[in-house]
Image (cartoon, rainbow, N blue to C red):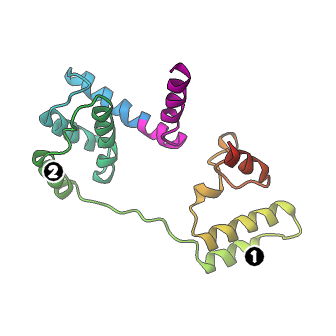
Amino acid sequence: MTTLDSIVAKFRNHTYAESTKKTYQNYLKSYMEFYRRINIALVPLSPLNLARYVAYLPARLQFNSINNYLSIIRLLHLEAGITSPLESFFMDSVLKGAKRVLGCTVHSKLPLTPKILNEIFTLLSLSSSKDLCFWAACLVAFFSFLRKSNLFAPSLSAFDPLRQLSRKISLFMQRVSD
């Protein structure tokens, strides 16, 4: 049983990608700050207190982010085996009203166009292996409709060969075989 339980724990630990875990940790930190301020229990959360949390969030966030922050409330209640207070007419009406009052902005990512690709190409020296590698990454991104984060790490220290483009495919193959 202990072996099976450790396997189950391992599976649960790998439910979310590391980036998703970090995002959820930020959401949880925000919610914990709120519940400490108004001195309520972490769960269960009443619909009224949830509505208060929705009212608390716009001080720092736009409406588009509020639903993302509310996902941690849903997860906390699911983990506790309790029905989420998000699933009610009251909360639907609060969120609909918040959307009307706060507005909903869309920040779409601009595509990598052939014109931009051509401008990049004119700046590169294909006799340089680094430039050639960068050009290959640009072409992969363009023809695969990828986001920047699929190819490049935000910093050298954050580079993960299992998530970003790498010259060594053996790491990928090792991950697949695990």
Q: Secondary structure at mark 1?
A: helix
Q: Nearer the viewer, residue 176 or 124?
A: 176
Q: Residues within 10 Å of mark 2 (few under 14, many from 20)?
A: few
Determine which of the numbered discs, if any, sits on residue 92 in the image.
2
Query: Which residue is located at x 50 percent, y 28 percent?
Result: 9
The residue depicted at 87 percent of the width and 64 percent of the height is: 128
Q: CA distance from mark 2 to mark 1?
A: 52 Å
Residue 145 placement (x, y as % from top left): 57, 69
Residue 161 visible in the shown view:
no
| Magenta-colored span | 1-24
Residue that carries the numbered disc 1 in the rendered image: 122
Question: Could you tell me residue 4's position as x and y percent?
Answer: 52, 26
Residue furthest front in the image:
1
Residue mark closest to the camera, 2 vs 1 = 2
Q: Is residue 146 left or right of residue 119?
A: left
Dot 1 amino acid type: Thr
Which quadrant: the C terminus?
A: top right
Q: Does the residue at mark 2 contact the one at mark 1 (Cβ under 8 Å)?
A: no
Please indicate whether residue 29 sits to the left or right of residue 122 in the image. left
**Identity, as a three-letter code, of the amino acid under mark 2:** Asp
- Our reading of the magenta stretch's main secondary structure is helix
34 falls in the magenta region = no
For the residue pair 58 and 79, the one nearer the viewer reads as 79
Q: Of marks 2 and 1, which one's residue comes earlier in the chain? A: 2
Please name whichever residue, 59 or 112, is drawn nearer the observer in this view of the structure: 112
Decide if residue 15 is in sight here: yes
Q: Horizontal placement of 147 versus 24: left or right?
A: right
Give the class, few, some or many, for how many residues have Cα within 10 Å of label 1's Cα (few <14, many ≥20). Answer: few
* x 54%, y 39%: residue: 18
